[in-house]
Amino acid sequence: DMGGHDTYMHKEISEQPDAVDRVLRGRIDDRFNTVHLGGLNLDPREARAIRRVKILGCGTSYHAGLIGASLIEGMARIPADAEPASEFRYRNPVVDPDTLYIAVSQSGETYDVLAAVQELKRKGARVLGVVNVVGSAIAREADGGVYVHAGPEVCVVSTKCFTNTVVAFALLAVHLGRIRDLSVTDGKRIIEGLRKLPAQIQEILEQEEDIKKLAAQYADAKSMMFIGRVRGYPVALEASLKLKEISYIHAEAYPASELKHGPLALIEPSLPTVAIVPDDDLLEKNRAALEEIKARSGRILAVAHREQEKADHTIVVPKNEDELDPILMGIPLQLLAYHTALALGRDIDKPRNLAKSVTVE
Ligand code: F6R
């Protein structure tokens, strides 16, 4: 049942304010400005002993893991990174007892992720799951974890599950952070930011008509470039994946800082760039990248907290805490991919060559 929407993807994009509300519900502790996660199975002493965090997932879940790693490293001050589960599995990684491994999967059934979890457990590692589907294979195999409570996602490409997974990582980061070095005031600041997300996502969804008009202007592109820096880079990766999956337009994502080391050679009027430009300590650096692109007559669509004069168009999104901004900056780009695919007449809920859960190698 699409509930009045033309596609499941549109329905699921629209459900995000409620979905985010659900992942937060019952988990925030205002007395200690922290987060309780019932199924984690990690006591404070164990949480303090973690020396590294390694996050494993595929596709969109890997991208959510990249944001998760930066949230955990930033708030809990534990070195953290994310890697595609299949790459990890085949490179014979060193499995370290002081590392917390986290498997991310919306379906909980992705074979490459499940096999990585099984290999890790065989070697004695502790593995948590960040999973949407309750009771799925990865959820059962993990030692504990966080359910993302996005509700059922029918469209092959993920939107609300992605957003909720990132929010679940923010909750985990506050939880670990408050056991370690995140101050009471920083805990409170992030918790207040998390509570603002549903209304801010709603505000972005209300810009749909404008985003649809923009999509019509970019739908003739043969290829698109997505750039972001540090927190903005995983947003660029995810937006680029979403666009290619449903519109079949070729897209690349690069850290903005890498442009001059190669991809700048591609920039010309027929290759538009989508730039993630948050109002944070890297704003001037990001603006410099826009200037480099403009100097080569590249078209620019910015996602920013205020109009960017170097950009041809800006989608202005509400500001949250710097750490949580990536969550909001991804939302308009789901709509951009959606309306681009719609303008091109694509089968949005069932893109060619793709399946919802990849249970084979
Ligand atoms: C893309 C998408 C895929 C999945 C990937 C992993 O929109 O949904 O990239 O994220 O196949 O699936 P899960 O998260 O179920 O492990």
Image (tube, rainbow, N blue to C red):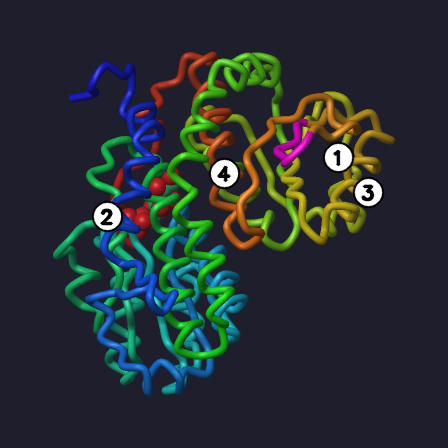
**Residue on which the image places disc 2:** 149
Q: Quadrant of ligand 1?
A: top left
> Upstream in the sequence, badge 4 or badge 3?
3
- How far is mark 1 from mark 3, CA to CA? 17 Å
For the residues labelled 4 and 3, the Cα–Cα distance comes to 22 Å
Type of amino acid under label 3: Ala
- Is there CB contact under 8 Å for labels 1 and 3? no
The tally of labels here is: 4
* In this view, 173 is above or below 216: below
Give the residue at x 54% y 15%.
210
How far across and down, in percent of the image, does residue 157 sit? 35, 35
Distance, label 2 to label 3, CA atoms, is 39 Å
- Give the camera-side residue of 36 and 173: 36
Instruction: Mark 4 and mark 3 in contact? Answer it, CB < 8 Å.
Output: no
Residue at the (73%, 30%) spot, across then down: 308
Question: How many neighbours does mark 3 have within 10 angstroms: few (below 14), some (14-19), or many (20 or more)?
Answer: some
The residue mark sitting in front, 4 or 1, is 4
Disc nearer the start of the sequence (1/3): 1
Tell me which segment is drawn in magenta: 301-306
